[in-house]
Image: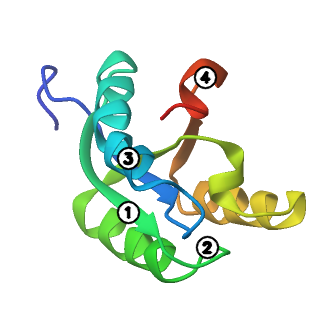
Amino acid sequence: MKQTNERPLAFGYYSARVSIPAEETMNHRETLTAFAGREGYALADVFAEPSKEPSVALQALFQSAERRQVVAVIVPTVTDLGTTHHVQQVTRDRLEEAGIRVLILPAQHGGGC
């Protein structure tokens, strides 16, 4: 049984497409870490998806989540889950079916993350 002072683990996940400025990408970890702490999680790692749609980094996230008992994934915006509503929903469903809760940063943080 987990000790009560241990925070459940969360991963950060975001799209690192070429169109995202380097400075914004560098700020993701800090913002995701702060949000995780406020929500009662410990940020274990951050995955940056280099492709247009969820693929390589998402697969690595799934594999690591199972090994490390991660219970949540934090994304800056819903568009980090995919470029269309359908892809976003499929990605969210896959995560939730794996027992991983999806948390999206509040709007004031999402754009400037």
Cα separation, mark 3 vs mark 1, equals 16 Å
Q: Amino acid at mark 2?
A: Pro
Give the residue at x 35% y 40%: 27
Give the residue at x 68% y 64%: 91
The residue tagged with tag 4: helix, strand or loop? loop
Q: Is residue 81 left or right of residue 9?
A: right
Residue furthest to the bottom in view is: 56
Q: Earlier in the sequence, mark 3 or mark 2?
A: 3
Residue 102: x, y in percent?
58, 44
- The reply to whether callout 1 and callout 4 are in contact (CB within 8 Å) is no
Q: Which residue is mark 4?
A: 106
- The numbered dot on residue 47 is 1
Q: Nearer the viewer, mark 3 or mark 4?
A: 3
- The reply to whether callout 3 and callout 2 are in contact (CB within 8 Å) is no
Give the residue at x 44% y 71%: 62
The relative height of residue 1 versus residue 22 in the rendered view (above or below) is: above
Q: Amino acid at mark 4?
A: Pro
- The numbered dot on residue 54 is 2
Cα separation, mark 2 vs mark 1, equals 11 Å
- The reply to whether callout 3 and callout 4 are in contact (CB within 8 Å) is no
